[in-house]
Image: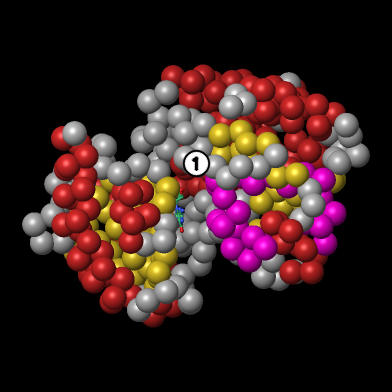
Amino acid sequence: MESNAETIKRLKERLEQGHLKTVIIPHISPDGDAIGACAALSEVFRLKGMGCHVLTCDFIPEYLHFLKNIPSAISFQEKPETCKRHLAEADLIFMLDHNTVSREGYLEEWVVSAPGEKVIIDHHPDPDPQAYVISDTRVSSTCELLYTVISRIFGTEVITPDVANALYTGINTDTGGLSHNSSRPETYRIIADLLELGLDKAYIHERIYQMNRISRLRLIGNVLLNKLEIIDSYPVAIMPITRQELERYEYRDGDLEGLVNIPLSVQQVLVSVQITERKEKVKLSFRSKGQIPVNEWAKAFFNGGGHLNAAGGQMELPLEEVVQKVKETTPWFFEQFLVKSNE
Ligand code: 5GP
Ligand code: MN
């Protein structure tokens, strides 16, 4: 199999052919890592005089709109025809922070049928085979990996303060403020490089952690006070959230970001599951401590997947039935996990 270094070299040669049109796509319900990566890469392409559009299948949370080029990202839900045209015309389609086209929502079928070559830059396991796959599950975040990709292809001179700020946003948010997934010394070396290149850490922290609305605090407060439940005899916290509650607290995209991690701050809680009722489906978010593989639980019962300690899924069932399913499958999951960890 081709190594990442070889793929990066091949991508460099392709990009050097010039006159390329590119499209950059984050995953559905994008987070700080996906959007930080889109902002950084699109800014590098812009600096290099290359045509580039960021396309999303849904909406980018408001708190990430401060990042370079993000306000001009095009949503398929607002401008489907424009998205289809850019996809049809693109020479290269960059898929950032996801391993498969099925994480691209409405864009999926247009990406699949587009003639351009696809480039995955990601840190999730088992990426789809595509023309260029740069993937490493050991990195903290896609932004950490993207730092290496950009500096090998273009040199660090394209890493302007805007690019450094965008990359750090991804590294910081995907590691829970450098608390999890961040034991690799390389992560900190890259942050040190970013600081030398003009990263404004205080500004990013302010934009990420000090831009709350009161209604968001009340939404989270309500869930923790009234909705959080511990499953009988298991170290599992669940938090079911209805659409009515989201409406009552003026929910906006991104308002629930980070909530699922909070129950893990209780010593006895080893797994946290947030179950959120959306328009057409129920979305699940799983988080765990240590070696508990919540991605296996998400994959086995909830049409999902992800990482060992952070996974997600979705169900087209009423909220109460999904909650029931989580409760019913909890003994199965712990049995599986215990058998595996004793092998
Ligand atoms: P989150 O809980 O933040 O939405 O997702 C955590 C992680 O779970 C993501 O980084 C992604 O790897 C994975 N994930 C979330 N939702 C899905 C899904 O519907 N399908 C798959 N395969 N993975 C998901
Ligand atoms: Mn990520």
| Kind of residue indicated by mark 1 | Asp
- The residue that label 1 is drawn on is 126
x and y, in percent, of residue 224 in the image: 26, 62
Residue at (38% x, 80% y) in the render: 244
Quadrant that contains the C terminus? top left
**Does the magenta portion include 97?**
yes
Nearer the observer, 228 or 112: 112
Residue at (67% x, 63% y) in the render: 109
x and y, in percent, of residue 249 in the image: 41, 73
Question: Which of the 4 image quarters holds residue 200?
Answer: top right
Residue at (8% x, 57% y) in the render: 233
**Does the magenta portion include 26?**
no
Which residues are the magenta region? 85-109
Quadrant that contains the N terminus? top right
Q: Tell me the colour scheme of the image.
A: secondary structure
Residue at (16% x, 49% y) in the render: 335
Q: Residues within 10 Å of mark 1 (few under 14, many from 20)?
A: few
Asked if residue 246 can be seen in this view, the reply is no
x and y, in percent, of residue 282 in the image: 40, 70
Nearer the observer, 314 or 275: 314
Nearer the observer, 49 or 87: 87
User: Going by the image, does 54 lie left or right of 191?
Assistant: right
What secondary structure is marked by label 1? loop
Q: In the rendered view, would you say 277 is above or below 75?
A: below
Nearer the observer, 206 or 19: 19
Q: In the rendered view, would you say 83 is above or below 200?
A: below
User: Going by the image, does 79 lie left or right of 291?
Assistant: right
Question: Which of the 4 image quarters holds residue 339?
Answer: top left
